[in-house]
Image: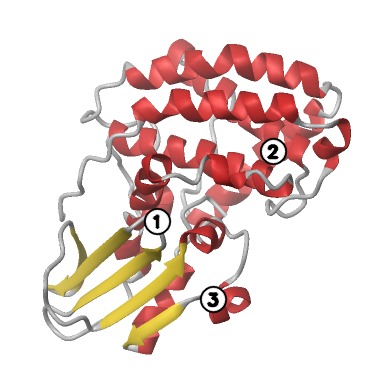
Amino acid sequence: MHQKPFIETIHLFKPIHDALINVLKELEPGDWERPTLAKQWTVKDIVAHLLDTTTRGIAILRDGHFGYSGPVNEEYTTLVNYINELNAQFILTANRWSPQLLIELLEQCGPVHTQLLADLNPFEKAIFSVAWAGEKESLNWFHVAREYTEKYHHQLQIREAVNKTAAIITPELFKPFIQTFFLGLPHLLRNHTAPAHAIIAIEIEGAMGVIGYLQYHNQQWNLLYESPGNKLYAKTIIPATIAWKLFTKGVSPKEILNEIHLEGNQVIATQLLYLVAVMA
């Protein structure tokens, strides 16, 4: 298996937690019922979901308590349906709670969850694999990075609903987020072939300055971690303000075609738009 890079994110949990609490305390009463890019979830629903995953993480990592055994069938769609059901159950329960209570619980539980993640050995096997990257087993650092992308993109959905995204779309916070998503690209392209040693690129346009490269070698796609300097077989350029929505199913590729740029092999370049780095 091609070795993945170590993407460190644990130091970013505190700043995004603090940013979340700050923006939630600024919300007006009507803001909590605003619709979001998370399909049928309101702002309040997303906040409840963040509390759900945070407390669930504490129960598992600190107490070894999983609650449910999970599906016997490990197929991706079965797992997605199971997770969706868990999420819906908690959000339904959280309808009884006030916004203020949700903030207080998140404020208390967020740092506890962060410390538990920080205590994990980055290079030991994680309790859960990162299924959207096609992995049956993952290392803890990838699990932690996946948790970071969850907390980050859900906060972006909240902020998008109230027009306050700019505060956290910074290179420090955005680059590791999107680089973690890029780890799913080889799995996305697993059924697509190219000439031997062909190199493709995906670029996040703007101040973020993130470019991912992949090379086709020995019948598989492998990520490269520096510019190869070769002629590209295909390239996809996506604005940062679109990329986070696209890869979390907030918008569809068809909706944003006029805002992105495709070069070279159109089939491969277009396929890169279908990366989904959430369980959906």
Q: Mark number for residue 258? A: none
Crowd band around label 3 with a 10 angstrom C-alpha radius: few (<14), some (14–19), many (20+) = few
Q: Mark number for residue 207? A: 1
Q: Quadrant of the N terminus?
A: bottom left
Amino acid residing under circle 2: Ile
Crowd band around label 1 with a 10 angstrom C-alpha radius: few (<14), some (14–19), many (20+) = few
Mark 1 or mark 3, whichever is nearer to me:
1
Amino acid residing under circle 3: Glu
Q: Earlier in the sequence, mark 2 or mark 1?
A: 2
Which residue occupies 53% across, 59% down? 241
Drawn side of residue 150 relative to residue 122, left or right:
right
The residue closer to the viewer here, 72 or 61, is: 61
- Marks 1 and 3 sit apart, C-alpha to C-alpha, by 16 Å
Mark 2 or mark 3, whichever is nearer to me:
3
Q: Which residue is mark 2?
A: 46
Q: Is residue 106 visible?
A: yes
The residue closer to the viewer here, 29 or 94, is: 29
Q: Is residue 82 visible?
A: no
Q: Earlier in the sequence, mark 1 or mark 3?
A: 1
The residue closer to the viewer here, 52 or 27, is: 27
Q: Position of residue 100 (x, y in %)?
A: 78, 18
Q: Is residue 263 above or below residue 126?
A: below
Q: Position of residue 163 (x, y in %)?
A: 69, 48
The residue closer to the viewer here, 143 or 211, is: 211
Tell me where residue 130 sits by quadrant.
top left
Which residue occupies 33% across, 47% down? 136
Q: Is residue 252 above or below residue 24?
A: below
- Marks 2 and 1 sit apart, C-alpha to C-alpha, by 28 Å
Q: Secondary structure beneath disc 2?
A: helix
Q: Position of residue 101 (x, y in %)?
A: 77, 16
Drawn side of residue 270 relative to residue 122, left or right:
right
